[in-house]
Image (cartoon, grey):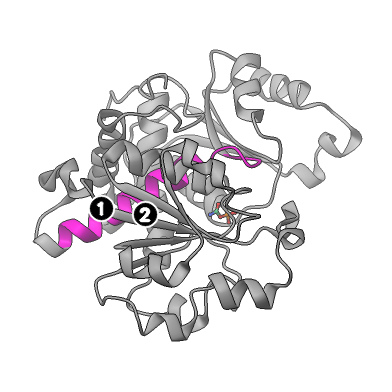
Amino acid sequence: MRTIRGGHLLTLEGVDRVQVVDVLDTAESFVEVHHRTIRKVPALTGRVVASLFFEESTRTRLSFETAAKRLSADVISLAVAASSVKKGESLRDTISTIEALGLDAVVLRHRSSGASEQVARFVPHVHVINAGDGQHQHPTQGLLDAFTVRQVLAERRGTTGRESGAELFDGLRVLIVGDVLHSRVARSDIAVYRALGANVRVVGPGTLVPRELTEWGVEVSYDLDESLEWAQVIGLLRLQSERGSGEFVPSLGEFATHYGLTSARLTTLDPRTLVMHPGPMNRGVEIDNAVADSAHSLVTRQVANGVPVRMAVLYLTVAGGDGR
Ligand code: CP
């Protein structure tokens, strides 16, 4: 993977441990900004960040825009539904138009896999950050998931993540459950956890977890209950009806019975097992209310950590890690 510092963040494929730890340590240094009376640092003063979401988002868009503002950047946000995209303007022309206004970074979500790589070719002098492209990658979700796990494991040792070092992840057993096939989050999570030295297993129905996924360097299983005994961290995935995932399972009820983290399964978990979900959750499908709201669940912490992790990514890409 190309360097994040002073560059783009398009994918976590090929990321190494040093690059991941660089982002996680930088994010950790930004956590305290949230607790200040004035929640701002001057790192990106005078820089312009465009927030371009061609696909729906709550968490990612709001946390990127919050992160950019906390770094004192100017944020321009395109309301795609009210823009000339609706008149048929191409992605290239849209980006060129915004670039002409003066731009340092683009945060892009798009339904097409590879869209952010295309934009990085259109505007090579602008830092491009992939906020989720089709089924391909969601790099900042992978980073914030790893950051959250590191934070909790370090707290259990009475240290910070930075002090604990990356060996916290050595041999950690991470289970990713559900619709792996259509999931950009799964691709980014697998890349980041493997880079940090964790063992990753995926589990789900054969239609959504084909045997060939072993090529991604993960174990493949179809037995959720056995896998829950194995796992120390459980990453649930959303069944993505907008990408046709519903066609890959006989019914939502059957999926929930075999692969949902139900309240009955909750009682079988080791008390230290961590449960994660990137959101938005399909409660009653991949996760029951009792699980989402249990002491195992890190869902709210994942959302909160989206801000310091995205501050770190903006700071490292746009400012190259200089100027604080
Ligand atoms: N996890 C995630 O990407 O959520 P949003 O679609 O709400 O941004």
Q: Name the image quarter holding residue 218.
A: top left
Q: Which residue is mark 2?
A: 305
Q: Is residue 231 visible?
A: yes
Q: Which residues are magenta?
A: 132-155
Expressed as whole percent of the image width and height from the top left, the position of residue 157 reads 10, 60
| Amino acid type, residue under disc 1 in the picture | Leu
- Tell me the quadrant of the picture where the N terminus can be found: top left
- 192 relative position to 32: left or right: right
Q: CA distance from mark 2 to mark 1?
A: 21 Å
| N-term-proximal mark, 2 vs 1 | 1
Question: On the image, which quarter does residue 23 sit in?
Answer: top left
Q: Residue at 10%, 46% (x, y): give it.
A: 163
Q: Position of residue 63 (x, y in %)?
A: 48, 50
**What kind of secondary structure does the magenta stretch mostly adopt?**
helix
- As drawn, 111 above or below 262: above
Near mark 2 (Cα within 10 A), the count class, few <14, some 14-19 or many ≥20, is: many
Q: Are marks 2 and 1 in contact (CB under 8 Å)?
A: no
Instruction: Please tell me whether residue 254 belongs to the stretch shown in magenta.
Output: no
For label 1, the SS is loop
Secondary structure under badge 2? helix
Q: Quadrant of the C terminus?
A: top left
User: Is ligand 1 closer than 8 angstroms to the Cβ of mark 1?
Assistant: no
Residue depicted at x 24% and y 55%: 151
Mark 2 or 1: the one toward you: 1
Q: Is residue 201 left or right of residue 165?
A: right
The amino acid marked with disc number 2 is Asn
**Residue 174 appears at what percent x and percent y?**
35, 55
The answer as to whether callout 2 falls within 8 Å of ligand 1 is no
- In the picture of the structure, the residue carrying the numbered disc 1 is 172
Q: Is residue 133 left or right of residue 92?
A: left
Where in the figure is residue 202, as x and y percent of width and height? 46, 54
